[in-house]
Amino acid sequence: MKTILVLNGPNLNLLGTREPSVYGVETLADVERLCQDEARKLGVSVECRQSNHEGELVDWIHEAGRRIAAGDMLGVVLNAGAYTHTSVALHDAIKGTGAVVIELHITNVHAREPFRHHSYLSPAVRGIVVGFGVQGYPIAMQALVRIAAT
Ligand code: CA2
């Protein structure tokens, strides 16, 4: 059974505890349950991780690149949080490993502050899911399964 890696970046451990009008009321544990439920439906396994540290996210993209190349991972759903708008290192990790990555944002970043409109990741990823709330996570997982089948 192939695996999907779901990575959440800085401050996403605060989901459901602050700013519910922006990010909703679901916690990170709820998101991870949603991903486990979707994995069961899709017949894949899922690993969910969260880090507040850029280098740890880079290391996990490297790991994903190796596991995708080995044939046991489908790809990565990546909500890099604020690193989306700052991180050349994550851009380079995605490009450098060739990892199949879906960039995800809970909110519609294009309807928010101008500093959220630019993503260093978008030019490096396979696709983007933006603005569907936490339902974006299962949508992005479906996308990974569908593009692997084509
Ligand atoms: O919409 C998204 O998913 C974001 O990636 C979330 C990031 C933000 O910097 C991006 O521009 C868009 C922020 C995640 C912080 O999450 C919090 C959740 C609850 C309370 C405080 C922060």
Image (tube, rainbow, N blue to C red):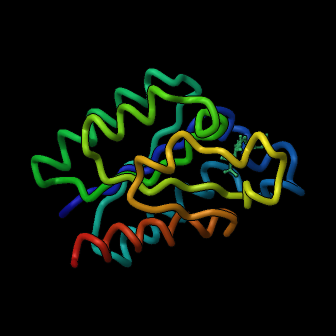
Q: Is residue 112 above or below residue 129?
A: above
Horizontal placement of 34 versus 92: left or right?
right
The quarter in which the N terminus is drawn is bottom left
| Residue sitting at x 71%, y 49% | 117
Q: Residue 137 in the image: x percent, y percent? A: 53, 63
Q: Is residue 122 above or below residue 96?
A: below
Quadrant of ligand 1: it is top right
Q: Residue 90 in the image: x percent, y percent? A: 45, 32
Q: Residue 80 in the image: x percent, y percent? A: 56, 41
| Residue sitting at x 43%, y 24% | 56
The quarter in which the C terminus is drawn is bottom left
| Residue sitting at x 60%, y 33% | 83
Q: Is residue 1 above or below residue 62?
A: below
- Report which quarter residue 13 is drawn in: top right
Q: How many labels, in total?
A: 0
| Residue sitting at x 30%, y 60% | 45
Q: Nearer the viewer, residue 141 or 87?
A: 87
Q: Is residue 13 above or below residue 55?
A: below
Question: Which residue ends up furthest to the left in the rendered image?
Answer: 70
Horizontal placement of 122 versus 39: left or right?
right
Q: Residue 9 in the image: x percent, y percent? A: 57, 37
- Report which quarter residue 39 is drawn in: bottom left
- Report which quarter residue 11 is drawn in: top right
Q: Nearer the viewer, residue 83 or 5?
A: 83
